[in-house]
Image (cartoon, rainbow, N blue to C red):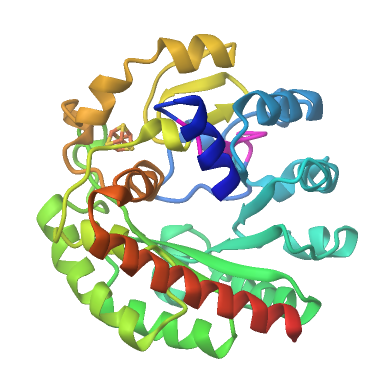
Amino acid sequence: MMRWQLRNWWRGNKRVPVVLMLEPLHTCNLACVGCSPERYSGDLRNRLPLSNCFDAVEVCGAPIVSVCGGEPTVYPEIVELVDGLIARRKHVILCTNAILLDRFYRKARPHKRLAINVHLDGMRTTHDFVVDRPGVFDRAIEMIAEGKRLGYYVSTNTTVYRETSVDEIEEMCALLTELDVDGILLSPGYHYEAIEGDAHFLFRDEIHEKFKRIVALTQRYPKISSTPLFLQFAAGMRDYPCTPWGNPTYTPQGWKDPCYLIGNRYYGSWTEFFGGVDWDYWESRRDPRCHNCKMHSGFEPSVVRKLGDSLADVLTMARWQMANVRNTKRRVAA
Ligand code: SF4
């Protein structure tokens, strides 16, 4: 990551992708309340061929690839895809609902560049409500435990909805700490104009209220691995411009303008996409759909981008990074 950042700084590149959000398919075995039909109702036959995935990875250059979708374990070539990304020296985050994770475990192997990231939106009642199917929470917990037993780096990814109480988030953090997960990512499910009337999403003030309490939780649960500065941002304690180019999204329809969430239009080529999107506009958050947004894929890169502005922030991030390194060393030694 450091090499990538330094190389781009040396070349004078102002906008640098950090995490490629790779959606090899829009087929899913769930239809969660927070998801758009575009993301889960796709035909498996319309999935990206492996060669397109690898071409996108090469041309984008980001050192981290987050494989999402759709549900990536439904992608028939998922093991070949992960192996190919590792062979290209990428850090891979496999985002999954865990229902078919045992199928992946049977064919794949743990690797220091691979993280399994299990979707878990709270405890049993909330999670099964959000994914609209009973039993999914129990399955996710079972697969987290199995991943840890097999030696994988296993983290979780939680969207905090209106239905989610912070007490419940604390209960979930306690359970995940007991399971010895390697990281707990927390991010707000926010309300935007295009989904007006949807009761599940949070408005900005509600996000701040919940995340102020979540910031306090990080003292008791060091496994919470969202960066401390992002959590402060989610709690309304600091502000950032958006950095949508930090996490570009590649899908079966092409490169998505401008971000993981909003699909204004799609581009066939990286050059057209990266040079064609009005990044100044999207960074400014002037668009009505951006007003309440606190999405980690838009703002975690902003934390990195704005780090040089404050020595105190650099020290906060250095302490956080050291804690992560210690955690990783302990895991590798075990
Ligand atoms: S503010 Fe949110 S919705 Fe707007 S471009 Fe950034 S990530 Fe996308």
State whether the magenta stretch is mostly helix, strand or loop: loop
Q: Disc count in the image?
A: 0
The residue at the far left in this view is 205
Report the magenta residues as a range: 16-27
Q: Quadrant of the C terminus?
A: bottom right
Q: Residue at x 58, y 63 (%)?
A: 118
Q: Position of residue 139 (x, y in %)?
A: 64, 72
Q: Is residue 313 above or below residue 10?
A: below
Q: Residue at x 35, y 88 (%)?
A: 220
Q: Position of residue 321 (x, y in %)?
A: 47, 68
Q: Quadrant of residue 98?
A: bottom right
Q: Position of residue 294 (x, y in %)?
A: 27, 48
The residue at the far front in this view is 10
Quarter of the rendered structure image containing ligand 1: top left
Apparent side of residue 203 relative to residue 176 in the rendered image (left or right) = left
Q: Residue at x 22, y 56 (%)?
A: 233
Q: Quadrant of residue 242?
A: top left
Apparent side of residue 236 relative to residue 230 in the rendered image (left or right) = left
Q: Is residue 254 above or below residue 83?
A: above
Apparent side of residue 108 relative to residue 272 in the rendered image (left or right) = right
Q: Is residue 229 at least partly visible in the picture?
A: yes
Q: Quadrant of residue 291?
A: top left
Q: Is residue 67 at least partly visible in the picture?
A: no
